[in-house]
Amino acid sequence: MTSMSDLEKISANREGFNLRARAHMQSSYYNVEQFKQGHNMLRKLEQEELGDVSGKTLLELQCHIGVNSLSLARMGAKVTGTDISDEAIDIARGLAAELDLDAQFVQANLYDLPSVLDGQFDMVFTGYGTLSFLPDIDAWAKVATQYVKPGGTLTVVEIHPMLTLMGDVDGELRIARSLFQSRDVHHEMSSTYSDRIEDEVEVETHSIYGWRWSIEQVVNALINAGMTIERIREVPYDARQRLPLMVPDGDHNWRIPGDPIPLSFSCIARRA
């Protein structure tokens, strides 16, 4: 599946996301207090692509602290969430108990999930900022597909790879890197993401490793795993401010003035 080097990076990411999980209880991006009061934490594109989930069994991969999973439970889905971070899963379980929401949470490295979670689901879902922490996109697609019931769907909502290549230079959008070179990413982080760049939360310095995937690679991985692609969308808004020149659009999303490039994409695939 992965080399030992990749396994070490996955382990480092787990420790990093343990730190981030605790910090995200104070992050404006997750806004846990607003969530507790009933706010739906799913972003516009996620809600549109998932549609009516009432009465459906649903698995969220890489659910982090579980606010999306629990929002889906409020919408009537029978939800299971999974994440590599044990701190994040502990928080998710605590929120489910505190709010009396029917959802279960499983801690596992995604690639090891089949060893700890059985069954299939009407819907499998993965949201913003998840695929970039996976070193093997083909193995991801196989794991995700095995959890989809025949006739069921897999919904991916992600940061558009175009956005990950851009930099903000004096208020202008510039290409800063290549999607076809240096796919591996490594950052030493002393803060974690929030809704606005200026509101990022300080955390203990930690390493985060990532991998850049093109839409082509994601789609072909799903096709090779046996899924049929039903729809792909590209939209000019994102769930949070990733560059200083991005501005809020009044609909809980962020845009680059003039909408010059796609910032998010979605893919819906169905299992025969």
Image (tube, grey):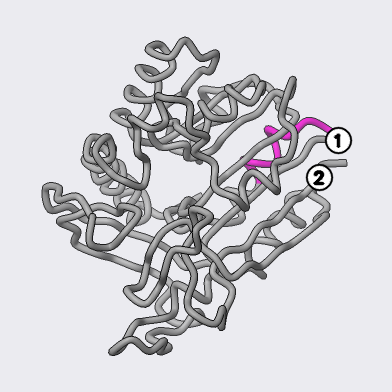
Location of mark 2 (residue): 270
Magenta range:
142-150
In this picture, residue 185 sits left or right of residue 213: left
Q: Residue at coordinates 19% horizontally, 50% vertically from top-left?
A: 201
The quadrant in which the C terminus is found is top right
Against 65, is 220 above or below? Answer: below
Q: x, y percentage for residue 136?
A: 52, 56
Q: Residue at coordinates 23% horizontally, 35% vertically from top-left?
A: 22
Location of mark 1 (residue): 151
Q: x, y percentage for residue 241?
A: 38, 64
Report crowding for label 2: few under 14, some 14 to 19, many 20 or more residues within 10 A (C-alpha).
Answer: many
- Residues 72 and 231: in front is 72
Report crowding for label 1: few under 14, some 14 to 19, many 20 or more residues within 10 A (C-alpha).
Answer: few
Against 56, is 175 above or below? Answer: below
Amino acid type of disc 1?
Gly
Q: x, y percentage for residue 89?
A: 37, 26
Q: Helix or strand or loop: what does disc 2 sit on?
A: strand
Q: Residue at coordinates 31% horizontally, 88% vertically from top-left?
A: 169
Q: Quadrant of residue 66?
A: top left
Magenta-drawn stretch contains 101: no
